[in-house]
Amino acid sequence: MKILIPGSFDPPTNGHIDVIKRCSKIFTEILVGVVVNPSKESLFSREERSSMLEEIFKDYKNIKVMSFEGLLVDFASKNSVDAIVKGLRAMTDFDYEFQMAQANSTLAGFETIFIPSSPEFGYLSSSMVKEIHSFGGDVSSLVPSEVLKRLNNE
Ligand code: PNS
C-alpha cells in the first residue's frame, strides 16, 4: 500500500520523523508531500524543507520526498497513492484534521488514516520549534541534527 504523508514541514520535527518512520514499517511505500503554499510565509524554502527530509530519510528505501502546490487530492491522484496518513497529537488536532479528511474524501474519494503521535511528541509542533529557537532556546532535543544545522545556519 502506497501512502502520502503531507505537511508543511517548516521545519520537520522529531514528531514528524517519528510518525514517518513508524509508517515506513507498516506501509510498503511512503511519499512525503511538502506543501508549497504561496499565501503562507515559511521560514524554509520548498527546496530546503525537501532536502532536509531527503537527508533524514536517505537510508530508507521506501520513503520518497516530493513537494507540491495546489490541492492535496490532485497530488495524491497524480502519484497514485492509496490513502493519506496524518499524525494526530491530541484532540485539539482532531476537528481540523477530521474536516480535511472529510473534504478530501468528498473531493476525490481519498481515505485518511490517522496515526497517534508518540506520547513524548504530543506537544511538539514546527511553530513551537521556531518560537523557542527565535528566542535563543535550545531545540536540539526537538529536531533532527539535519534541521538543527539549518536553524543554526551551519
Ligand atoms: O503541516 P500542515 O501545515 O498541518 O499541513 C497541512 C496540509 C499540507 C495537509 C494542508 O494544508 C493541505 O492539504 N494543503 C493542500 C491544499 C488543499 O488540498 N487544501 C484542501 C484540504 S481539505
Image: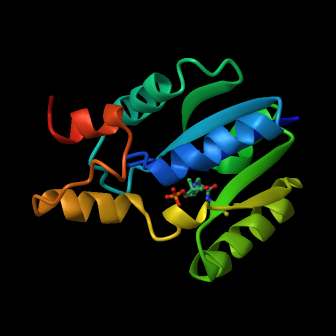
Query: Which residue corresponds to the image point at 73% horizontal and 48% vertical from the top-left?
Result: 73
The image position of residue 74, as x and y in percent, is: 72, 43
Query: Which is nearer the eye, 34 or 27?
Result: 27
Q: Quadrant of the C terminus?
A: top left
Number of labelled discs?
Answer: 0
Q: Residue at x 83, y 29 (%)?
A: 28
Asked where in the image residue 146 lies, by quadrant, the reply is top left
Q: Quadrant of ligand 1?
A: bottom right
Q: Is residue 122 above or below residue 21?
A: below
How was the colour assigned to the protein in this rendering?
Answer: rainbow
Residue 84 point in image, percent of width and height: 76, 49
Q: Report whether 91 appears left or right of 3.
A: left
Judge by depth and name the residue closer to the eye, 103 or 13: 13
Above or below: residue 86 compared with residue 154:
below
Query: Quarter of the image containing the N terminus?
Result: top right
Residue 125: name its quadrant.
bottom left
Against 14, residue 135 (above or below) is: below
Position of residue 151 measured from the top left corner of the image (x, y, whole percent): 21, 42
| Left or right of 118, for residue 1 | right
* Position of 3 relative to 117 (above/below): above
Looking at the picture, how far across and down is residue 2, in whole percent?
Answer: 82, 34
Q: Residue at x 14, y 34 (%)?
A: 153
Asked whether 14 or 108 is in front, the reply is 14
Outermost residue, left side: 136
Residue 50 seen in this snapshot: yes
**120 vs 136, nearest the viewer:** 120
Can residue 79 be seen by looking at this rendering?
Answer: no
Which residue lies at the image location 82% right of the left edge and 36% below the top edge?
Answer: 27
